[in-house]
C-alpha cells in the first residue's frame, strides 16, 4: 500500500486538467500534465489499510468476490472501453 502522502499527491492528477509537480526531483520546474486518457486503477484489501475519503470520492468502488471471475473480466472490459467513468454505472 502506498503512503497517504503519495496518494494525496496523485489526487491532483484526477482533477480536470490534472497535473503533478515533482518538486522532489529538483530539476522539474514545469508541472507534468495528465494525458486526456489518463486512468488510475486501484486495488485494495482493507486488511492492509484504506484509501482516503478524498481519493474514494473521485473513484468508482466495486466489491468483487473471488469466485466471480467471469464477472471480473466483464466489468474490466467495460471500464477500459469507456472514457466516461459514469457510463460504467449506467451499464450495471
Image (cartoon, grey):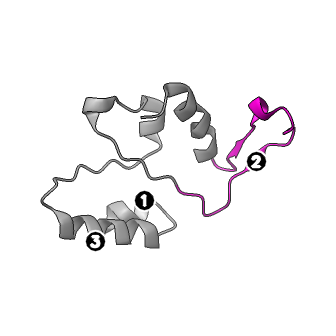
Instruction: Quarter of the image for the N terminus: give it.
Output: top left
* Residue under the point 43% across and 29% down: 52
Are dots 3 and 2 in contact, CB under 8 Å? no
Residue at image location 21% in from the left, 53% down from the top? 64
Estimate how packed mark 1 is, as few (under 14), some (14 to 19) or many (20 or more) residues with alpha carbons within 10 Å. few
Give whichever of discs 1 and 2 has the lower sequence position: 2
Name which quarter of the figure residue 35 lies in: bottom right
For the question of whether residue 92 can be seen, the reply is no
Q: Residue 74 carries which label?
A: 3
Q: Position of residue 27 (x, y in %)?
A: 87, 37
Indicate yes or no whether the magenta region holds residue 29: yes
Query: Which span of residues is magenta-colored?
Result: 16-39
Look at the numbered discs 1 and 3 and tell me whether their residues touch, using CB distance below 8 Å.
no
Q: Residue 49 vs residue 72: left or right?
A: right
Figure check: 67 above or below 58: below
User: Residue 54: horizontal and vertical position, in percent?
Assistant: 48, 32
Q: What residue did someone put label 2 on?
A: 32
Q: Which residue is at a point 25% across and 64% down the rendered structure image?
A: 72
Closer to the chain start, of discs 1 and 3, is 3
- Which quadrant holds residue 67? bottom left
Amino acid at each position: 500500500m502506498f503512503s497517504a502522502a503519495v496518494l494525496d499527491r496523485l489526487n491532483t492528477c484526477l482533477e480536470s486538467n490534472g497535473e503533478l509537480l515533482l518538486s522532489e526531483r529538483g530539476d522539474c520546474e514545469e508541472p507534468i500534465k495528465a494525458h486526456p486518457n489518463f486512468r488510475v486503477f486501484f486495488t485494495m484489501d482493507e486488511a492492509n489499510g484504506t484509501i482516503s475519503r478524498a481519493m474514494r470520492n473521485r473513484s468508482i468502488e466495486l466489491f468483487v468476490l473471488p469466485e466471480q471471475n467471469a464477472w471480473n473480466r466483464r466489468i474490466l472490459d467495460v471500464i477500459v472501453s469507456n472514457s466516461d467513468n459514469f457510463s460504467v454505472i449506467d451499464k450495471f
